[in-house]
Image (spheres, helix red, strand yellow):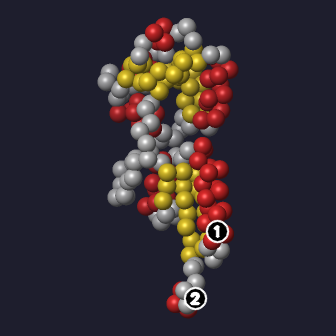
Amino acid sequence: MAAQVRGLEIGKVSVGTSYSAYYWWLAKLIAAFHQQHPNIKTGLLTGNSSELCEAMAEHRADFCIINRREGDFDWIPLREDPMVAWVPAGHPMTARKTFPLAAFAAEPFIAAFPSQETDNARIFAQNHIKPNTCFTDISFNLTWGRKRLLTNVIKKINIHLNI
């Protein structure tokens, strides 16, 4: 407490993200912050959006970059990111502008983090759709790699959520 009175900065700041694409960027920001504020401990948390919301509620995280979840939090939208389907070139759905959400009940689906509450799992549950899961992966990077191997050339189609 005496250090705070003398103007020294002390404490801890923890940042969380559910997006692996942000890990290195956040790590660089945290390192730069730590250089300017060496007496403040810093941390980077990872997990899915629901897990990181729990970390916020339990004060283990100060802020997170995640998809919106229920809870008493202040939200600042960073971007709108549409849900998309990746299908092989030549697939009948490539002729369409949108991919119907209901089609996941029949079309082969690769589930990332199958036992976790992901945005995909939440949307399927909200719409009472049981996807035709053919493969499961424990990371989005593995899922993307598997899609590339299985489909060779891929076309991205926005998902039509009105089923």
Numbered circle sitting on residue 100? none
Where residue 52 appears, x then y in whole percent? 50, 53
Residue 52 relative to residue 148: left or right: left
Name the residue nearer the viewer: 156 or 16: 156
- Compared with 82, 154 (above or below) is above
Give amino acid for label 1.
Answer: His
Q: Quadrant of residue 39?
A: bottom right
Circle 1: element type: helix
- Residue 152 is left or right of residue 115, and the answer is right
Q: Residue at x 41, y 16 (%)?
A: 97
* Residue 34 tag number: 1
**Residue type for callout 2:** Ala
Q: Residue at x 51, y 62 (%)?
A: 61
Return the x and y of residue 155 as percentages of the image width and height. 54, 18
How crowded pointer 2 is (Cα within 10 Å; few <14, some 14-19, many 20+) is rated as few
Q: Is residue 1 visible?
A: no
Q: Assess disc 1: are there few (<14), some (14-19) or many (≥20) residues with their C-alpha within 10 Å of its C-alpha.
A: some
**Looking at the picture, how far across and down is residue 141, in whole percent?**
64, 35
Q: Which mark is residue 3?
A: 2
Q: CA distance from mark 1 to mark 2?
A: 18 Å
Q: Position of residue 83 (x, y in %)?
A: 44, 30
**Which quarter of the figure is the C terminus placed in?**
top left
